[in-house]
Amino acid sequence: MWRSKSGGKLDEPGVKKAMPRYVDIIKKRKYPKYMIAKSMSAKYNRRADTEELWETHQSLLEEFQDKQDEVTKRPKKRDKNLLGLKILLAHRFMQECGFCERYCRADRLHGDKGYCRAGRNFSVFSAFPHMGEEPELVPSGTIFTGGCSIRCLHCQNWDISQWKSHGRSLTPEMMSLQVRELAEKGCRNINMVGGDPTPFTWQWLETFNHVDERIATIWNSNSYYSSETAMLLAGFIDLYLLDFKYGNNKCAEQISDAPGYWEAATRNHLTADKYGELLIRVLVLPEHNECCTRPILQWIHDNLGPMTRVNLMFQYRPEWRAEERAELTRRLSLSEKLEAKEIAQEMGLQNLIE
């Protein structure tokens, strides 16, 4: 069983400033949002139209925001609750899929597959206590699922995101057993990743309907999910571990086939900051400091604040189809790494992960 040192990295000022509630969950001072959502009584008709259900959801979410930090005793699950309403809304979305920004409208409940090629059940490639994530996250109960809403030419997990093989098919009930196993191994959190977790939003919500472990939830995503998905995650996810990939739509579309990425990413970072806590990853790409790194870091400073927790990442390596763009065929130079650090300092960001 993994056992991290008491508090290890959680007491660092930058961590406590950026994610105090996450720290409190790990230290058993507060409860994860999913448990509180299950304790919030919700009155709704399962046959009501979707617009009415969304209105009820928004009202309950506002109540959740006011009450979540008042919970001092283990929350008791209600028969009809906020998490159940999220599950119902997400299940309807599965019939006309709109979890990602593409809104492909595939009927995944009846065998259709859209851009991400995800189906009705989870496709799980691996699940283990990850020791290679950011220090405040490890050991992290990381679960890799197949498929992705974008196609980065340089994807380091392309065998998972592009279905080079197929993982284990798991229902949400089966996945809940995996979550329990990771919790019993001493993981601090459940880290939903891929590929990207977005295609499996309904499955993840349903999974935690069968979970009762006191463990933090992490949404480890490329940020290219719809506004509806963002609201389904609100009141469910404790810590958003979001990639901020591009500083403009041209680079996003040419490299990752992600039209409208800037609008989706900025919107979702703001929503994540409102309803949870944030740790942002910025992977520096060769020759993209001015077009991407600079505007990304500027936006973070101006809209989320200088104490936002940012991991400026320099481990880029050419993978998959990177040879299709000349600048992506090499690793970063030392001067590019130093330039990215200088940009962060220039922008006044004060909570970079060293």
Image: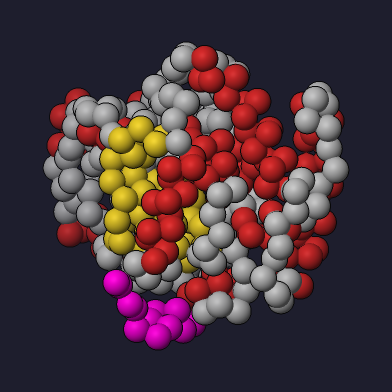
Asked if residue 324 can be seen in this view, the reply is yes
Quarter of the picture containing the N terminus is: bottom left
Place of residue 85 in the rendered image (x, y in percent of width and height, measured from the top left): 72, 40
Q: Main secondary structure of the magenta part?
A: loop
Rendered residue at 31%/50% (across/down): 127
Which corner quadrant of the image does residue 161 belong to?
A: top left
- Horizontally, residue 41 falls left or right of residue 7, namely right
Q: In front: 111, or 240?
A: 111
Left/right of residue 174 with respect to residue 42 in the rendered view: left
| Any part of residue 343 in sight | no
**Residue 12 highlighted magenta (yes or no):** yes
Q: Quadrant of residue 182?
A: bottom left
Instruction: Name the residue at 29% across, 56% down.
Output: 128
Q: In the image, what residue occupies the spot 22% across and 28% down? A: 165
Picture mark count: 0
Q: Residue at horizontal 82%, vertical 56%?
A: 63
Residue 258 drawn at (x, y percent): 44, 28
| Rendered position, 105 above or below 8 | above
Q: Position of residue 325 (x, y in %)?
A: 22, 29
Residue span colored magenta = 1-13
Q: What is the basis of the colouring in this image?
A: secondary structure
* 199 within the magenta span: no
| Left or right, residue 165 beside residue 151 | left
- The quarter of the image holding the C terminus is bottom left
90 relative to 23, above or below: above
Q: Nearer the viewer, residue 208 or 332?
A: 208
